[in-house]
Image: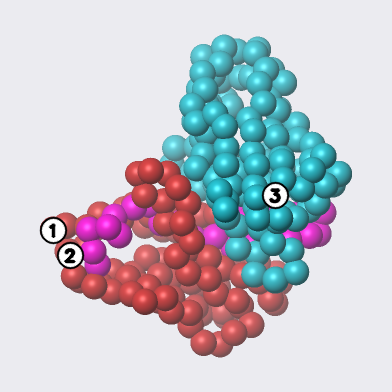
Chain colours: A red, B cyan
Amino acid sequence: AQTVTQSQPEMSVQEAETVTLSCTYDTSESDYYLFWYKQPPSRQMILVIRQEAYKQQNATENRFSVNFQKAAKSFSLKISDSQLGDAAMYFCARHAMYSGGGADGLTFGKGTHLIIQP
Amino acid sequence: NAGVTQTPKFQVLKTGQSMTLQCAQDMNHEYMSWYRQDPGMGLRLIHYSVGAGITDQGEVPNGYNVSRSTTEDFPLRLLSAAPSQTSVYFCASSLAGTNTYEQYFGPGTRLTVT
């Protein structure tokens, strides 16, 4: 089974500081998509950032950026200037091909609980 | 647009009962899917559909049935509920042809089987 591993069950950071969440994954494909989703206590899944594997440039969305290391199969999320509203579960995910072969679903890591200390 | 909607938000079932979780989207997305989220776990794919009349199994399909008669709706059926199906269920949809595979999620249904 293709897996996504988040090795940090919980991270804590001071407000306004920078934090990096780790993610590694398994794949035999050369082109694929990677995602970070945020899940606040409301449990709504919110897309934070997306990276396409064939693109060399790391994706950036405002205070959120990734460090994508394709050879190492590593996809970490950096949050700069942390804010209280960033407190949530963060899930790393990659597009997965299932038996149907279509664009059909995501494989998720187990998540990292991010705590923001005021 | 309402996006992806799910009903009900909460449900309690007794073991052996059946029910259908409803999911609808108004974005004309071809792809729809169901995930379950258990404590300490990420979301796991149950079933998915790449268009009306076409469905297939994901990672954890046992105990669930789906059908897709329209583009908008993708209900998930539990034929005989078991305590192991206690979970939060998410429906998601995505647009074909964009090659981004970004999933739009509904708000989730919390199901408890006693």
Q: Position of residue B75 (x, y in %)?
A: 70, 35
Cα distance in 3D space between marks 3 and 2: 37 Å
Residue furthest to the front? B1
What mark, if any, has residue B17 been given in the picture?
A: none
Q: According to the image, label 3 marks what residue?
A: B32
Instruction: Judge the density around disc 2: few (<14), some (14-19), many (≥20) Cα neighbours within 10 Å.
Output: some
Q: According to the image, label 2 marks what residue?
A: A15
Q: Is residue A105 inside the magenta stretch?
A: yes
Residue furthest to the bottom? A56
Chain bearing mark 2: A
- Marks 2, 1 in one chain: yes
Whether label 2 touches label 1, CB < 8 Å: yes
Q: In terms of secondary structure, where does tag 1 sit?
A: loop
Q: Position of residue B56 (x, y in %)?
A: 80, 45
Q: Is residue A46 inside the magenta stretch?
A: no
Q: In terms of secondary structure, where does tag 2 sit?
A: loop
The type of residue carrying mark 3 is: Met
Instruction: Give above or below for B20 relative to B38.
Output: above
In front: mark 3 or mark 2? 3
The type of residue carrying mark 2 is: Glu
Q: Position of residue A36 (x, y in %)?
A: 48, 63
